[in-house]
Image (tube, rainbow, N blue to C red):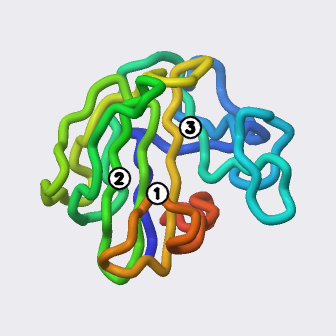
Amino acid sequence: MLFANPVAGVIHPLSWPRPAGNHAPKVTQWFGCTGFVREPALGTCEHFHRGLDISTRSCGPAILAAAAGRVAASFIDTNGEKIVAIRHPHGWATGYGHLDHREVHKGDVVAAGQVIGTLGMSGNATACHLHWWVKSDLEPADNVFGDATGRWRNPWSHLEQNT
């Protein structure tokens, strides 16, 4: 399964050259082992970042559903982070964190590219960005957030533009 870009514009890694004035989204933290101590442990990593952090110049750009599916969760966690999670066919799920505003609710059916919220810095965020994650191998009744259910996947390798 391939996913479309969840933020309007093309995502560029930090290492790619960017012309002056180009405010396209860029990846500011990668999936995998990290030295960032706020991330929880996973496997052999003391700290593991479970998604991509995608930043733009400011808060507010539209966040888009990366693929069609049903909203599995739309809530504000105990740290004030606004989160949306979408279940997709064949056991896949995507999550969208640190939103400024949520446009969808649990149970809503969404189309690929539909606006589901706006980019923000809610919860434990130090700047405006989207924390975007991908999981696979979920059973229909499984919790999309639990580490014991499904496999965390590197979102970068599942973006349409990178295949």
Residue at 54% x, 67% y: name it. 158
Labelled disc at residue 54: 3
Q: Quadrant of the C terminus?
A: bottom right
- Please tell me whether mark 3 sits on a helix, a strand or a loop: strand
Residue at 42% x, 41% y: name it. 7
Question: Horizontal and vertical percent for residue 46?
Answer: 85, 50
**Gap between marks 2 and 3 measured at Cα:** 16 Å
- Please tell me whether mark 2 sits on a helix, a strand or a loop: strand
Labelled disc at residue 85: 2
**Residue carrying label 1:** 145
Give, as a three-letter code, the residue at label 2.
Ala
Question: Horizontal and vertical percent for residue 45?
Answer: 84, 56
Of discs 1 and 2, which sits in the foreground? 1
Q: Is residue 64 above or below residue 76?
A: below
Q: Quadrant of the N terminus?
A: bottom left
Crowding around mark 1 (Cα neighbors within 10 Å: few <14, some 14 to 19, many 20+) is some
